[in-house]
Image (cartoon, rainbow, N blue to C red):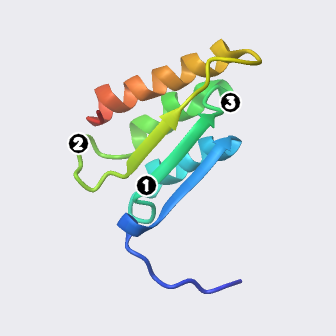
Amino acid sequence: NYRLPELAPATLGTLGSSLGGLLSCYAAATRPHVYGRAGCMSPSLWWASEDFRLNVLPKSLPASDPRSPLLYLDSGDVGGDASSIEAPTKATCDAFEQEKGYR
C-alpha cells in the first residue's frame, strides 16, 4: 500500500531469475506501457509446458513496435539439467526474433 511516483516505461524495469525471470518476461511482454526493460535470467520458460512462448508471447507485444521493451534473456549451460533450461530459453529468444522483430 505504498504510492509510487509515476515513471516513464523507459525508466522502469524488472529483473528476476528462475520463476522471477519468467515473471519479468511476462510483465514486460504483457505490460510494455509499464515496464520498458526486463532482465530474465535463467527464466523458468519450461514451466507450465512452455505456456509463455506458446500462448502468452504470440498475443502480446506488437511486432517491431519501437516502444517494445528492452529484454535481456540468459541461460547457463552448466549444472543441474542445463539442457532442460537452455532449450526453452533458446526457443523463446528465437520466437522474440522471428515473431516480434527483436534482435
Q: Where is residue 95 in the image (x, y as percent from the top left)?
A: 39, 27
Q: Is residue 79 left or right of residue 101?
A: right
Q: Residue 37 carries which label?
A: 1
Q: Residue at x 48, y 21 (%)?
A: 90
Q: Is residue 94 above or below residue 70?
A: above
Q: In which quarter of the image is residue 36?
A: bottom left
Mark 2 and mark 1: span between their CA atoms? Answer: 15 Å
Label 1 crowd (10 A; few <14 / some 14-19 / many >=20): many
Q: Where is residue 55 in the image (x, y as percent from the top left)?
A: 50, 33
Q: Position of residue 54 (x, y in %)?
A: 50, 27
Label 2 crowd (10 A; few <14 / some 14-19 / many >=20): few
Q: Which mark is residue 64?
A: 2
Label 2 or label 1, whichever comes before in sequence order: 1
Q: Which of marks 2 and 3 is in front?
A: 2
SS at circle 3: helix
The reply to whether callout 2 and callout 1 are in contact (CB within 8 Å) is: no
Q: Is residue 85 above or below residue 10?
A: above
Mark 2 and mark 3: span between their CA atoms? Answer: 27 Å
Q: Residue at x 26, y 35 (%)?
A: 101
Q: Residue at x 61, y 24 (%)?
A: 76
Amino acid type, mark 3: Ala
Amino acid type, mark 2: Ser
Q: Which mark is residue 60?
A: none
Label 3 crowd (10 A; few <14 / some 14-19 / many >=20): few
Q: In this view, does 101 lie to the left or right of 17?
A: left
